[in-house]
């Protein structure tokens, strides 16, 4: 069941950012020889979830691995999954799991890839969902919980009714997940369904390469599911966007640097499951880029309402020092495709206030970042509904601005929501002004502070409507 955490915003937003969030990088879509993975077991000697988890723990910038075996047999090794191995996989994940160091999860990839069907990643069930009987030399049912092979309505409702579970659409196509084998009934074309919305938490930005044998972190898929993501948002679904590897060889975390990134207070299974159900995650080609996308302190995945014009902040923080070439903020609503409403170029921060919204209409916003090297990052959305009594009080009393990094040693990036005319000043603890400059129509600026002495400073941004002061630390 997806959890919707809603915040009520008055003149100043309820500040969910009081909770400290950390960034954790991993993948929830992979396979072992329990089904059709570990195809190179003869070379690596790894054929079970246990061995695969041990391998993944040594991968770079990798904090969790979910193994999602195909839920059925069909034929030996294609995919060849048998019921007893579901409990075996759960047990192996429990044994390998190390909260605080590396998370190991075990789930299933439900479904088939024939026309109008599709694959769904499911976590949170301690029993196998399936439809087969008497397969692979095994008598009886090859499932614990029956669900007809093409009954996606039944699957989504089962997930919705399990408070511990969620599902995530694997490499989705526009004709997938049809309940009657027609194009019109496919999930991406059928009317909005609240039960499905409660069950489905997201789609991948990219998936694969499933057949990659690469272990150099460089074999990226060329395709993407960005259009599918935007299509489901248009229909009205509340979904996030992540990243999949779909490993079928022993290269967990190493085929490419793409990562599903979750925001959670600490690295525990409970926190990961909660973060996924609340859509506190994003998809990234870069394996250590930390993205902050907030609305008045509320993080990605939030569903909010209030009576202020919303202000969005984006911070791109790459641990290797890579720069953002562009930051875009997209906006849409049910029945309206997302469009770019704000762009910031060659800056690691961006701030945008949307003063053009209709009361009592739910909007969704998400951030898209392209790095200088072309790597791509997309965040899960924030949803916001404004009341009739829209106010600009929060914006007239305090100018909205964003800055990065903090602490800083060389260059400080600052972005301002209202960029007509404003001034920036920096003062030290003795109230001595060490920097001051006025800007006109510049949404983003970069200040060189390498000559500043180490210490604590006050950063002030001021315009004709007001001013705001934030603490700056120079190393």
Image (spheres, rainbow, N blue to C red):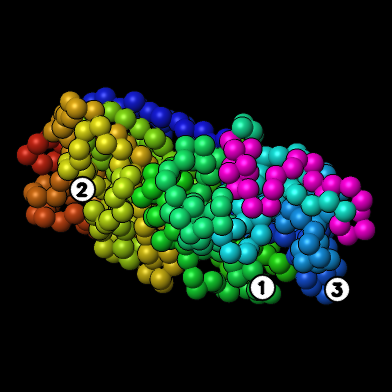
**Residue drawn at point x = 21 percent, y = 43 percent:** 354
Q: Which residue is mark 2?
A: 416
Locate residue 381 relative to residue 102 in the image: left or right: left
x and y percent of residue 124 in the render?
67, 39
Residue interval drawn in magenta = 135-160
Give the image location of residue 340, x and y in percent: 27, 56
Q: Mark 1 falls on what kind of element?
A: loop
Upstream in sequence: badge 3 or badge 1: 3
Secondary element under disc 3, as helix, strand or loop, is helix
For the point 72% across and 69% down, which residue is it? 249
Q: Is residue 155 left or right of residue 335?
A: right
Query: Which mark's residue is nearer the viewer, 3 or 2?
Result: 3
Badge 3 local density, few (<14 within 10 Å), some, or many (20+)? few
Q: Is the residue marked by circle 1 packed among few (<14), some (14-19), or many (20+) residues within 10 Å?
A: some
Up/down of 219 relative to 305, above or below: below
Residue 43 in the image: above or below residue 108: below
Q: Which residue is mark 3?
A: 42
> Which dot marks residue 211?
1
Left or right of 368 on screen, residue 90? right
Give coordinates of residue 357: x percent, y percent. Answer: 20, 40
Is label 2 in a helix, a strand or a loop? strand
Relative depth, front residue between 14 and 468: 14
Q: Nearer the viewer, residue 347 or 283?
A: 283
Residue 304 horizontal/vertical position (percent): 35, 32
Could you tell which of marks 3 and 2 lies nearer the N-terminus? 3
The first of marks 1 and 2 along the sequence is: 1
Give the residue at x 52% y 58%: 182
- Between the residue at mark 1 and the residue at mark 2, the CA separation in whole angstroms equals 45 Å
Q: Is residue 441 left or right of residue 185?
A: left
């Amino acid at each position: 069941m997806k959890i919707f955490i809603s915040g009520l915003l008055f003149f100043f937003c309820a500040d969910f950012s009081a909770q400290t969030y950390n960034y954790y990088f991993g993948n929830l879509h992979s396979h072992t020889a329990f089904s059709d993975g570990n195809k190179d077991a003869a070379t690596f000697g790894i054929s079970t979830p246990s061995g695969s988890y041990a391998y993944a723990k040594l991968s770079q910038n990798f904090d969790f691995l979910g193994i999602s075996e195909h839920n059925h047999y069909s034929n030996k090794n294609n995919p060849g999954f048998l019921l007893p191995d579901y409990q075996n996989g759960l047990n192996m994940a429990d044994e390998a799991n190390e909260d605080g160091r590396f998370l190991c999860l075990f789930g299933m990839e439900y479904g088939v890839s024939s026309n109008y069907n599709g694959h769904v990643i499911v976590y949170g069930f301690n029993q196998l969902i399936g439809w087969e009987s008497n397969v692979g030399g095994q008598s009886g049912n090859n499932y614990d919980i029956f669900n007809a092979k093409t009954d996606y309505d039944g699957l989504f409702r089962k997930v919705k009714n399990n408070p511990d579970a969620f599902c995530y659409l694997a490499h989705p196509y526009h004709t997938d997940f049809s309940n009657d084998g027609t194009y019109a009934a496919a999930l991406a074309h059928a009317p909005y369904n609240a039960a499905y919305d409660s069950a489905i938490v997201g789609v991948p930005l990219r998936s694969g390469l499933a057949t990659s044998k690469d272990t150099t972190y460089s074999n990226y898929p060329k395709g993407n599911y960005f259009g599918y993501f935007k299509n489901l948002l248009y229909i009205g679904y509340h979904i996030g966007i992540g990243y999949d590897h779909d490993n079928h060889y022993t290269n967990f975390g190493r085929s490419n640097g793409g990562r599903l990134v979750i925001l959670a207070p600490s690295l525990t299974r409970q926190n990961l499951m909660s973060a996924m159900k609340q859509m506190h995650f994003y998809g990234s080609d870069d394996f250590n880029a930390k993205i902050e996308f907030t609305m008045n302190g509320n993080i990605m995945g939030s569903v909010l309402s209030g009576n202020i014009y919303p202000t969005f902040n984006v911070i791109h923080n790459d641990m290797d020092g890579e720069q953002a070439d562009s930051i875009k903020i997209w906006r849409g609503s049910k029945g309206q495709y997302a469009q770019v409403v704000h762009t910031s170029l060659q800056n690691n921060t961006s701030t945008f206030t949307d003063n053009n919204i209709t009361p009592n209409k739910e909007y969704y916003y998400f951030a898209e970042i392209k790095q200088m090297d072309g790597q791509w990052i997309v965040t899960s959305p924030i949803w916001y509904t404004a009341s009739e009594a829209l106010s600009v009080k929060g914006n007239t009393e305090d100018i909205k601005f964003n800055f990065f990094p903090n602490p800083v040693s060389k260059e400080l990036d600052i972005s301002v929501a209202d960029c007509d005319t404003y001034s920036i000043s920096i003062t030290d603890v003795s109230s001595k002004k060490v920097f001051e400059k006025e800007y006109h129509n510049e949404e983003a600026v970069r200040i060189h502070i390498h000559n500043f002495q180490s210490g604590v400073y006050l950063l002030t941004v001021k315009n004709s409507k007001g001013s705001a002061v934030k603490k700056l630390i120079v190393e």
